[in-house]
Amino acid sequence: MQPTDSSPTAVTNGSSRDDLPTGTSNFCDEVRRRVAEVVVGQDVVVERILIALFTGGHLMLQGVPGLAKTLLVNAVAKAIDLQFARIQFTIDMLPSDVVGSEILDQKTGEFRVHKGPVFTNLLLADEINRAAPKAQSALLEAMQERRVTIGGRTFKLPLPFLVIATQNPIEQSGTFELPEAQLDRFMLYHRLDYPTTEEEDEILRRQLTMGLHRDEAGGAVPKTAFDMIADEPCATIPDLVGAMEAVQRVHTSDVFLKHAVELVRRTRESKLLDFGCSPRACLALVGASRARAFIHGRDYVVPEDLFELAEDVVLHRVRLTYEAAAEGHTGRELLESILSDLA
Amino acid sequence: MQKNQRKTSPLPPAGEGLGVRVASQPIERPQIRPPAEPQRPLTRPLRGHPLPQAGEGSQQPPCSKPYLLLLLLLLNLTVFVSPAFAQRGKAKVDPAANAEADTAASAEELIKQYGRLGEYQRYYRHGSTVFDNAVRFAEMDESRISPADRFLRAYYEGRWDEVRTTLEMLPDELADAIYDRMLEDLTGRNVPILTLEDFLGLADACPHEMTSPRIEKLGLLLRITVPKEQELWLRRAVEKGTRRLGGERAKRPASEQATAGDRRLLTGRILMHADFDELARQYLPDAAAAGRIEDTAVRDEILTFLATQEEIDQLQQSQFAELWREHEGVLANPQADSGRRQAAGEALVDLIEQAPLAAVEPSLRALVRDDPQAALRLASSLGKRTKSRRNASEVAMSVNDLRAQKYLLSCVSQQADLAAAPWSQVVTAMADRWIHEAEHTIANAPSYRTVDRPQPYVASEDLLESAPDGPWAEALSASLRERIEVCLSKVVLVCDHLDHATELIVRVASQNRDAGALLAEEYVKAWAYRHDPAIPEGIRKQYKLPDDAKIMVTPIMMEKNVADLARMMDTFRAHEVRPRNVQLLVDAFDVCYSNAEVYRRSHIEKVFGPVGRMDDEVFFRMIRKMTAGLSSRWRLMDVQEESGTRRSQQETLAMIRDGYASAIEMIDERTTTSPGDWQARMLAGSLLSDWGDFEYYQQLAAETGTDRVEAFRQKNNEAEEQFLRAAEVYAGQVAELGRGKASIDVYLAWFHALLGMGSGGQLNLAKPLDRAALEKIRDMIHRLPGDAAKAHVDKFARHVRARMEDTENPLHEQLKYKYLAGSLVITADSPFSFQASTKVAYYDQLLDELRLSTRVDGPNTIGRDDEFGIVLSIQHSEAIGRMADFGKYLVNETPLSARQPPQRQPVVTTYRMGQLQGRRDELEMNIREALSLFFDVRSIAFSPGDVEPRRTERPGWEETVLAYIHAKAKDSSVDKIPRIQINLEFLDMTGPVSIAAESAETLIKITDKKTPPRPFRQVDLTLTLDPRGLVGTEEVLLEIAATACGLVPDLEEMVDLEPTARQLPIARIDSHEGTVVREIASWADAVHPVSERRWTVALDACSLLEPPRRIELALPPAKVEDMAVKYQTYVDMDLVDLDGAAAMIGEGPAGPDRAAPAAAIAAIDPRVLYALVAVAVMAAVVLVLVLFRLFRSHKPRPLRARDVFHMPSQVDGFVVVQLLRSLGTSDLVRLSPRQRTEMQEEIDRVQKACFANGDGVSEDELRRIARRWLKIAC
């Protein structure tokens, strides 16, 4: 894997933007611009969110607290005019807190359904690994089937439906590691890094100029980045759907598919891994590559897409053997080796 | 606040009922009235009484029965709503309040709530549910709690009286539904939290009849919640009694308790289902009383529980005796018609089949004694039945039949003569029946015979027990008795008492020799099966053991097995029992042995007798078996390790040699006594040939340090002598042999030995073909008298042709050419060798179009101590170049094993280099084998797999460069580069064939004189001055790295060290590993290697330290003009380029040396200067050497782009794009901005062509792009 600039290039080899329906031609740039007004840096994460949106996959973000994960997702949701809900997972959370429950209306003596926060377009499952496995699995079922059952009745979730989960590094105390089968449901697993010095400097500068947020009663509190998110969306769900259609038209060559399959196959054959990637990983890799190609203005995928996304798609779907871990191997190192062999 | 709540609550507060007034409290009316619309009638009546219809309520008198019941319900509700009031157990009803119209509506609502309890509510009492409900009910507002919730609270808090009371007042169906759901949930999932008291309370809360399902569920619940350790408390609790269970009546006599509804009976049944058997017996009635219970299911259940095995047996005995008497009476009754008698006989046979023999014996004996005619009829029925059941699956019945017929005949023999009619017929039929049953068992019992689908069979022990003997056997004919003997022997072979079989076999053999021999063969098979150390397949699969898993045969086991087999063979020999299939005996002997032990002569003779008197066939088969073992498993160290022998390689080698010697010795002894035995001599020849191959080619032999060539030559000479003798002896006998008995075995064995085809099936592909020996074979055949010579040549040619066409066991591809060409030396004149000669001609034609050649890189005169290069290449026609694809011999991608055809015979390929990974390893082995006697092969650089052929001056011909061999002559006597061989693979109609192409010898001259350096050009020289260790080691290091096209020459040929040495004396020069050839550049104008060489020159710099001074050190200038020289030095830790061949080193002010270093040095007396330098060098050399070694070990050679980036083996758009991207982003690659732009454009172009909907880029073009950028970048 080689570090490359993940921002969209000016290369317009393809004609995908031209193929978009009216209003969606600058979709990605507009969303990026709107997010950039609020969040400094994290271009890669915005790209990953857009990939998840375009492909209908779900995204897991891992990073220590304070890296603007919540702010980022909030900003994207408002930029696209999506319904947004956030669940802060805690250890005492119940499945009904996620999907909703049947409650007894004492006036009528009848049960009525109280829909949970999962009924939204963009759901931020904050610190998902803080909840007990039962609550985690309630959300993961919804992710998989895009519908939930409450009191014997089944409800479809609104479309698009995207879960962006965040989790702290599992070494932290009070966390429950998600099993591999559940992690596999996340199309992408992105590990956030700290901002660069310049970005951090910019964050501080912005904060200094935000001023106060006043209420009607005359009280005030210093503004935060959340207050700076513009309420007016820059894109709509039809724009998003148009972009999704364009992604579906992105050309994927045979040679690319061959190498994607080869990558996945090699993870299964590696003696350092307990188990390799599932076919779902291969699908995710190709789907995400198409979306990335679209975001970068191409109507065909190139090897760079695969190399850029491999870590996010593959790494959470494999597990090192005990011996390999004991010998100091890491999944990232192994993936680099496989990718190196691939080319 | 509470008061307000009471006013707005839809339900009455605690302690108050609807329309119920408690005497001590004022009546408060509910604030919320029932709805105004007419009330719907209750769908179900309360306790079986019809409810008043709408409108009827007002017309009914207030005291009418349904209304009163409703009021009673509400009254009861208040009982548990107000625990304090309930404790008092009394409630006074104000009749005036009962007239409230809203009461009925409230009751309906209540029924609805309770209905949900029966339909939806779950009654699990797991940890979480109990505690969660405890918390939930504790947090509920007492005034707002609904009746249903109160019921649930009572359930979870274990107030079973309240539960019971509530259930009692609910409608029957609803109460039953709730109670049954409780039992269902409590027994349906995990173990609930339920104490003994809870259980008793729950049982008491049963609303109505305690049905059997409820009893079973309560029993199950009791079993899972009350452990056996608590039986004491359970006993006390049931003795004390509850509302529904146990109590004082337990002390009553059991006879007084007989009704199914009795509390004791209920208790007993619950305890019975709970596995408290002893306690249950105290509460259940005795068997007699239980027999009077009307409910059949309950009665059977209890009787089954109470009945003991003894009672059941007694019952069966009495039933059996009764039935036997009944049918015996009919059978013995002369007035009964034949149909009835026949039916009675069959019924008696049924009884015999179903009852054990011990039960039948007395009755049978009495029948025979009292009525012989009836016994005959019974025997007839038994015979008919057994005939009809032949080989049937009812094994137990068959066993009973067999036993019964033997017992019956035994009884009859005391009363009548079995050999006389009518019993003679019966005994024959019954013996025949036994024989068939025995044969069925022999065919199906799991033993040494393989049975595909085994059917049920009578156990061999049962057959032996029921076999004809005594008067029965004596009454049979001799032939039938013999059949029975044979069957008996076979039955013994499949049972566990194998030892008894020898005696039987000998007995059979004394009467019938052929049958005895056959039985002996079966016996040997069974013996070998029993002693086979291989794990049976079923066990291997069950425990996932490897296919060749075996039990380890220890020396003690081996000795015991040999003794056992020898005893058996002695017995057979003594009674002249000779198994005809000799191979069985040899295999049985092999089974005796550990897998890792060579047969010992003493053991062979112990089993089969002295060698001189041993049966011919046995002897030859044993020797062949031994030969196969010697050439395969016994010599393998893996086998030795697996068998736990702890033999070292030397010991294994010695054991194999002893084995060969022992086999030869036995053959010699044989030939001494039988000088005309040409087969023995032939066998000796094969063995000696194998032994010679073993001495030279085996890895084990290679490590002994003995003269392998001498041993090889000696053994082969001896082998040839034996073959010659064998051929001569055969030639002497051939005239006496008939035409059909002519044999070419001796010539074939000789031929195979020359080809390296071992007698044990192993192949030695490296064995050179000895043409002179082949001609000897030809001569020996042609010396045969008369027409025999031609007949033998033709037969040999036909054999070769058949071997060539054998698709099941084809010739090894590397042997095919050698085999056919070798055979033509012998059979060239035969018309049957036409195919072989055609095939060989085709192979020779292929070889005509290519020439393997070697040439020296540079002049052929080489200095004795000089290293030089040998270029190995193939000159070939364009057509053969395309067909042969010589690049495949330069990579290891295809393993050798994948190319070899399947072999039926065990093949052991003997290589001295261990396991080869692919074709390149094979070629490397050939090169090293050929050159190692004359040269020290430093390294071999192979061309890449996609090597392109080069044009040659000969039209239509090309040259493919294979390898560059970096070597040095061992001494000055070397005068040639010997032949090198490559195995080239082709395909013909018989499959793949490997033809060895050999290079011609190339003459060279090794001279002791000084010779010019080997050719080189384009030298890149990098001199790096490293003054960082100056203070610590008093040395300055000068690292010199050179790369060149050709072999890098010596340092003094390239640079002049004199100017530097004048300033700082040279302490030492370390030349590291010498010249290293990195690759062979066959694409350039001329073929040359790319080599590297490194030196470290240590300069003594102590003069710079005291006093500290700083000088400008002159670095060595280049001697050769077209040499690219780069000077570098370290500034702190950074490597910087120098502008010229000088660098400032040292600390402090610049000393006078900077101004006039040469003058100052020149002023010193040279002798003093040399002495000073020598002393300094000697003093520093030890310390510097150690430090330098340390420094060297911590300073790896810097990585370069060419180390990282290589031409990919498989090329497509993906690979090329990624390669270019990697080159563009790598720190190791330095590209100009223009090149970067160009590279990006190239990437874009390839991406667009390969990944967009374009036409793609051809593989050649991609390969060209990759190669171009690799050259630019590396």
Image: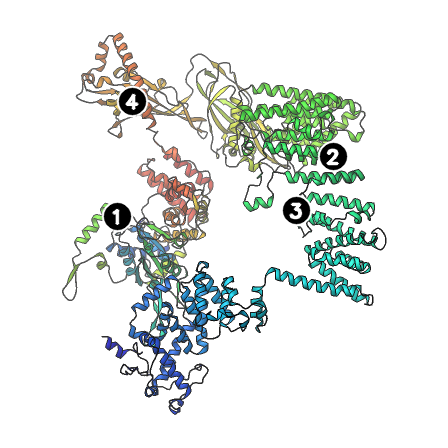
Which residue bears the numbered disc 3?
B446
Instruction: Tell me the SS state at disc 1.
Output: loop
Residue B1169: x and y in percent read 26, 10
* CB within 8 Å, label 4 to label 2: no
Q: Does B281 sit left or right of B1197 as displayed? A: right
Which residue bears the numbered disc 2?
B572
- Tag nearer the camera, 2 or 1: 2
Q: Earlier in the sequence, mark 3 or mark 4?
A: 3
Quarter of the rendering containing residue B1128: top left
Residue A321: x and y in percent read 42, 44
Chain letter, disc 4 residue: B
Which residue bears the numbered disc 1?
A195
* CB within 8 Å, label 1 to label 4: no
Q: Amino acid at mark 4?
A: Leu
Q: Which mark is residue B1037?
A: 4
Residue at image point 37% right, 74% down: B148
